[in-house]
Amino acid sequence: MKIAIIGTGNLGKSIAKGLITNNAITTLYLTKRNLEDIQDLEGYKNVLLTTDNIEAVKQSDILIFAIQPAHFENILRDIQPYLTDKHVIISTITGFLIPQIEALIGSDQYIIRAMPNTAIAVGKSMTCLCSNENGKKRLKIAEAIFNRLGHTLAIPEAQMQAATVVCASGVAFWMRLIRATTQAAIQLGFDAKEAQELAMYTSEGAANLLITNGHHPEEEIDRVTTPKGCTIEGLNEMEHKGLSSSLIQGMVASFNKINNIKKEQI
Ligand SMILES: NC(=O)C1=CN([C@@H]2O[C@H](COP(=O)(O)OP(=O)(O)OC[C@H]3O[C@@H](n4cnc5c(N)ncnc54)[C@H](OP(=O)(O)O)[C@@H]3O)[C@@H](O)[C@H]2O)C=CC1
Ligand SMILES: O=C(O)[C@@H]1CCC=N1
């Protein structure tokens, strides 16, 4: 597949790493105004770095946009004259709605919104997808790309803001939980490196139990909490201090902020 990533910053570079590692490209154009930060990707076969978005668009079929929301409109205006029927437009931009994209480049384009996360760099992104009417004809292509780089779920566009919080911002939320677990493990006597090892692999194991068994989390919790044991003592203390409540409130705050980003743009 001939893919271009327009805006190779934190997310764009993560997508590029995932695509390169998974051999999911025939050519990969990576664009940004200052190429210094992505020089490390230059040596890979069939990977081309350029500051020229139009050249990348002309040479590619799949266009993945990963610039900041404020830059998207101007870039779409610049590349619009060069779009043809071969192109699939994939936007990862937060809060930029399909009708806004259609207003700039036309509803006859194949437009898909993807919400991946930075774990795409290691082929483990949870990516939500939606499309415009025409884009439904190319949704399978987007699913094929992102399924190689993790797990996908097609959702209505109305749920895209919520998906951003749960999946994209979610990586940061989980990192903080893993970091806090590491700090506790250090206080309980492990050195920092071992503490992080324990935290990372325990969280991986917990997630995999749910993925593999399809159980509800409480079912797995019931298997661990010995009556009058140490697990329930710790778990209840965490809940007295507001663990679940604090997570839920934080995610709702994050969601409200996205709605403001959207308003600021309109
Ligand atoms: N970070 C994340 O985890 C996620 C981000 N997103 C969304 O993805 C988008 C990108 O986020 P993120 O990667 O964090 O942002 P970054 O700021 O890290 O990346 C954006 C990149 O765009 C480049 N850029 C700016 N202007 C242009 C231009 N005219 N042509 C080509 N490239 C340009 C910038 O480089 P330079 O200045 O050198 O041009 C920069 O590296 C955002 O819309 C965000 O909402 C979605 C899901 C997850
Ligand atoms: O924090 C942000 O606004 C972007 C969107 C999701 C992840 N990063």
Image (cartoon, rainbow, N blue to C red):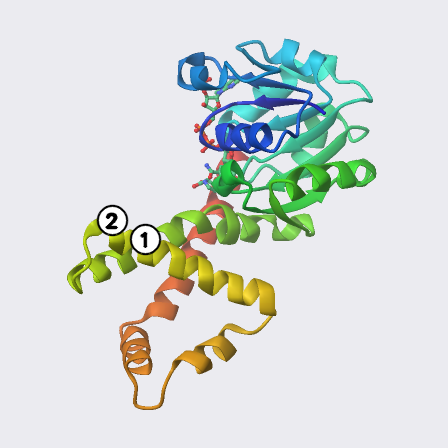
Kind of residue at disc 2: Lys
Q: Residue shown at 68%/36% (left/top)?
A: 145
Q: Quadrant of the C terminus?
A: top right
Up-down relation of residue 79 to residue 64 (above or below): above
Disc 1 secondary structure class: helix
Q: Residue shown at 48%/76% (left/top)?
A: 220
Viewer-closest of 9 and 163: 9
In the rendered image, residue 7, in percent from the top left (x then y), is placed at: 52, 23
Q: Residue shown at 35%/90% (left/top)?
A: 227
Q: Please give the label number shown on residue 197.
A: 1
In the rendered image, residue 10, in percent from the top left (x then y), is placed at: 44, 31
Neighbor class of circle 2 (other Cα within 10 Å; few <14, some 14-19, many 20+) is few
Are the residues at dot 1 and dot 2 in contact (C-beta closer than 8 Å)? yes
In the rendered image, residue 226, in percent from the top left (x then y), is placed at: 36, 86
Q: Residue shown at 57%/9% (left/top)?
A: 52
The quadrant where residue 1 appears = top right
Neighbor class of circle 1 (other Cα within 10 Å; few <14, some 14-19, many 20+) is few
Does 44 sit left or right of 144 as displayed? Answer: left
* Residue 34 seen in this snapshot: no
Q: Which residue is mark 2?
A: 193
Does 208 sit left or right of 182 as displayed? Answer: right
Up-down relation of residue 120 to residue 189 (above or below): above
Instruction: Report ligand 2 position as a quadrant.
Output: top left
Does 237 sit left or right of 81 as displayed? Answer: left
Kind of residue at disc 1: Glu
Quote the CA–CA distance across marks 1 and 2.
6 Å
The quadrant where residue 20 appears = top right
